[in-house]
Amino acid sequence: MCAIFSIPHKGIMVENTVHCNLNCLCCDRKLVESIRTKKSLSLNDLEKISAEVKDNKISSVFYFNLGEPFFSRNIHEELKTLKHDNADLCIYISTNGLLLDNEEKMKTCIQHVDYLFFSIDGVDNYTLQKYQRQGDFEKAYNNMKRIISYRNSKN
């Protein structure tokens, strides 16, 4: 298991996509998408990043920024590549939880992600949708419970 923020800490942030399934109140997605020349990483891009992680002995990858990591159709291959090339790498992901909705994605998380953070900005749909427009509290919360159950069933 990887240590959280041990000193010295060599980590980087990788944004696999700027796309998101939400329209959050505080996020200027249209501006972000307009200034980025590339909206998502290709698998070739990720292989290059993975090699740099290995060559530079980076211990942690924070796999998120402004986009929703699970919006990528290649999320499984991306995480698998990072872990395959860097067995001791600690991967952190933050998600709104809505797209973490099938067994394949859950399996990918359990196998390759060390820390998974759910950003659920409310205690019910009414509160959540003030901030995470197009969000769904029940779906995100249920996906969080499902991945915990899935993890527990796999020990």
Image (cartoon, rainbow, N blue to C red):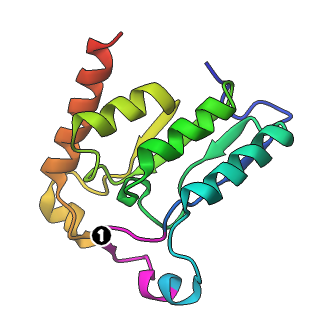
Q: Quadrant of the C terminus?
A: top left
- Give the labeled residue for mark 1: 22
Would you say 142 lies left or right of 5 here?
Answer: left
Q: Quadrant of residue 44?
A: bottom right
SS assignment at label 1: loop
Relative vertical location of residue 62 with respect to residue 149 in this rendering, above or below: below
Residue shown at 45%/26% (left/top)? 111
The image position of residue 7, as x and y in percent, is: 83, 32
133 over 116 or under it: above or below: below
Direction top: furthest residue: 155
Seen at 22% across and 48% down, the residue is 140
Of residues 13 and 122, the one drawn nearer to the viewer in this rendering: 13
Q: Residues within 10 Å of mark 1 (few under 14, many from 20)?
A: some
Q: Quadrant of the N terminus?
A: top right
Task: Look at the image and say whether residue 123 sits in the magenta stretch.
Answer: no
The part of the image, by quadrant, that contains residue 45 is: bottom right
Residue at the far front: name it.
44
Q: Which residues are magenta?
A: 18-31
| Apparent side of residue 87 relative to residue 138 in the rendered image (left or right) | right
Residue type, mark 1 in image: Leu
Q: Determine the residue positioned at 69% across, 45% down.
A: 50
Name the side, left or right, on which 94 lies relative to 151: right
In this picture, is 104 found above or below 41?
A: above
Residue 137, image x and y in percent?
Answer: 18, 53
Q: Position of residue 62 (x, y in %)?
A: 61, 47
The majority secondary structure of the magenta stretch comes to loop
Residue depicted at x 37% and y 56%: 73
Write down the quadrant of residue 109 in the picture. Answer: top left
* Figure check: 56 above or below 25: above
Tell me: 55 left or right of 102: right
Does 19 lie within the magenta span?
A: yes
